[in-house]
Amino acid sequence: EQVVRQIEQKHKYQNKVKELKYFQDFIDKDSRCLEIGAGWGTLARAIKDKFNCEMEVIEPSKLAAEVAREYFHLNAYNETFESFAERNGRQDRKYNLIYSYHVFEHIREPNLFLDKVKEILDRNGVLFLALPDALHPEVPSERFFHIEHCFYYIRKTLELMLNKHGFKITRFFKGATDMKVVCLRDDSLPTTALGNSEEYKKVKKAIGRFDRRHKILKSIKEIIYFPLSERQRDRTNRIIVKLFKK
């Protein structure tokens, strides 16, 4: 009950509706969709309501899977993707769309993950991933880098990883806090691809730039915010953030 109240009070379903624009060109009522790592199931429910498609979700958290099943009435599997893919592979069940929001960076074996995705994705199906972009961190490095993230990607390294497993990026969306890619299968791509140290330098430079900006903002707050009222602080903060975004 507490989780449901939180979902409703924070308008989580309404917020997910904003994501539907990314799916409208490759999903319809005949699509068979699978979300890997669905959380409470808010996005999956929004997609199902919008397109009236067949929807299944995988969620390893028992509580989250229960909410997705009982509150959002989704066909939710409480297990890991690996166990699901192994069982599903024996049934030869294919999906037209497989998508995952902020899960790929948590995967300890991304090579195995992509191989399993490919096994259960229809030959003309779509893979959709959303994940953090290390070139555009949304928080300081002490919070951006943490133990739950196994790997960090930029557009180039993500593309190399996907190409290695026969996926070609056909659309790239750069959001305020993440990057999103639409991929199609393409077995003509090279099976191996290596990056170089220049990509590492770009990431290091981007993170350093964000950290310096954060320190400047923090110093400004310590100097001028103390005598201001709470309302004045909020207004000043919005102005400063807007200036630094330019």
Image (tube, rainbow, N blue to C red):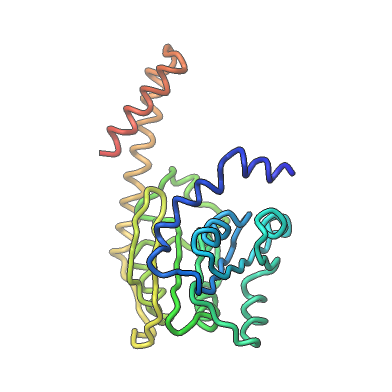
Q: Residue furthest left?
A: 246
The residue closer to the viewer here, 34 or 110, is: 34
- Residue at 42% of width from left, 11% of height from top? 227
The residue closer to the viewer here, 44 or 243, is: 44
Residue 214 vs residue 41: left or right?
Answer: left
The residue closer to the viewer here, 55 or 147, is: 55
- Residue at 49% of width from left, 63% of height from top? 51
Please determine whether, in this image, residue 154 is positioned above or below residue 215: below
Q: Locate residue 109: give its quadrant.
A: bottom right
The residue closer to the viewer here, 245 or 7, is: 7
Residue 165, percent from left and from top: 43, 81
- Residue at 45% of width from left, 67% of height from top? 128
Residue 70 vs residue 53: left or right?
Answer: right
Q: Locate residue 201: give its quadrant.
A: bottom left
Residue 164 vs residue 202: left or right?
Answer: right
- Residue at 52% of width from left, 60% of height from top? 47
